[in-house]
Amino acid sequence: MKLQGKKSVCVKMVAIAVLIAFACVGCAASGGGLTDTGKGAIIGGAGGAGLGALIYHANPLAGALIGAAGGALIGATIGHFMDERKKDLEKDLAPQINAGQISVQMLPGSALQVTTTGQTAFAPGSAVVNQGFIPTLQIIAKVVKTYGKTTITVVGHPDPGGTAAERASLANQRAEAVRNMLLVMGVPPILVIASGDPNSNYLDGRVVVVISPITSG
């Protein structure tokens, strides 16, 4: 019964992601302010999710996520795959790392975390992505699109000061701004979630991007 309950929760989470993806398609189709490039990224991602649902018909919701990611990782391949992606990021992001603008580290579970400084991604009080941060996002998007089998979680952090509601709003806006940028760069929307952390211990405007492996079996 416990196993069945966990499976149900997982299915519901993937279902929400699928619904968000197709809701985004609806927004794009109605002209909700996205560029043509952004619309294409969203529609393309949803199309991949639909294809995955057909292929993995035994569990179509999980299949949608796997289909959008171009497959899943199994067993011993997970660690090696993510080690290689860490090397890719460290190589391509070497200028930013050497300049102290970002850091790349491996987390438990073979997830990769890219963390910016407080000044790298946003100006104080702003939710507009700094131009200097765009090359970093382009490299993250390229790695995810090229090799697949991963999801992205974006966490935005607020600045110090202001009310709790203001900090929450700014953190969420920053996370969503980064997510939207990744979508425009062609990352399927079902693979990217974003959330602010208004209770962050780091009230410095930093952004955390976590790249997690999609596993099967």
Image (tube, helix red, strand yellow):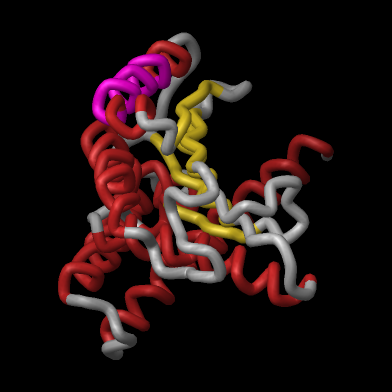
The magenta stretch spans which residues? 82-93
Q: In the displayed image of the protein, which residue is found farthest to the left?
A: 36
Rendered residue at 59%/59% (across/down):
195
- Above/below status of 63 relative to 183: above
21 or 144, nearer to the observer: 144
Rendered residue at 24%/69% (across/down):
38
- Above/below status of 105 relative to 48: above
Residue 3 in picture, x, y percent from top left: 76, 35
Q: In the displayed image of the protein, which residue is found farthest to the right?
A: 1
Dominant secondary-structure state across the stretch colored magenta: helix
In reply to whether residue 89 is colored magenta, the answer given is: yes
Residue 185: name its quadrant: bottom left
Residue 89 in picture, x, y percent from top left: 33, 27
Residue 190: name its quadrant: bottom left
Residue 6 in picture, x, y percent from top left: 73, 42
Rendered residue at 38%/21% (across/down):
86
Q: How many marks?
A: 0
Horizontal side of 190 relative to 94 (left or right) equals right
Horizontal side of 144 relative to 210 (left or right) equals left
In reply to whether residue 137 is colored magenta, the answer given is: no
Rendered residue at 83%/39% (across/down):
1
Residue 214 shows in this picture: no
Residue 124 in picture, x, y percent from top left: 53, 64
Residue 201 shows in this picture: yes
